[in-house]
Image (cartoon, grey):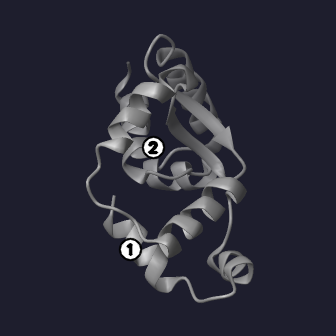
Amino acid sequence: MSNETAALEALLFAAGEPLSKEKISELMDIGIIDVVNLLRQLEKELNGHGIILREVATGWQLSTKAEYFSIVEKLASTVKQKLSTAVMETLSIIAFMQPVTKVEIEEIRGVNVDRAIAKSAESK
């Protein structure tokens, strides 16, 4: 794995959310064509690993492979901190509709979601 590919992997891992090619280009100080080439290279290098590189509506992100869902689910079930109903509703909307804005979540729930979003961020 080249240093640039490793840097891209670290960037996507640390972001914890999709990054656009433009944002990656800006952060790594390289051109879009180079970003595309690095994304392709990283995708190849992750073959045979437990994670994959996925393109989503808002960019690229690292995800666990679907075949490992059951083991990752076991980890999630061991988390001791329980989330409130408001936080669970907010996270459900995000998971179902992503990408989604705070305003859209508030329209769906009919309430301000500042606290629920802050609580969900604390639980990471």
Residue at x 52% of width, y 44% of height: 30
Front residue of 86/24: it is 86
Dividing the picture into quarters, in which one does residue 23 lie? bottom right
Task: Relative to 14, say whether 48 is above or below.
Answer: above
Q: Which mark is residue 22?
A: none
Q: Which mark is residue 119?
A: 1
The residue pinned by badge 2 equals 12
Q: Position of residue 74 (x, y in %)?
A: 37, 34
Dividing the picture into quarters, in which one does residue 54 lie? top right
Relative horizontal placement of residue 116, taking residue 37 as reference (left or right):
left
Residue at x 48% of width, y 19% of height: 46
Foreground mark, 2 or 1, reads 1
Task: Relative to 74, say whether 118 is above or below.
Answer: below
Task: Relative to 112, say whether 11 is above or below.
Answer: above
Q: CA distance from mark 2 to mark 1?
A: 23 Å
Q: Position of residue 87 (x, y in %)?
A: 48, 70
Residue at x 47% of width, y 23% of height: 68
Q: Earlier in the sequence, mark 2 or mark 1?
A: 2
Q: Amino acid at mark 2?
A: Leu
Q: Quick one: which residue is furthest to the left in this view?
A: 80
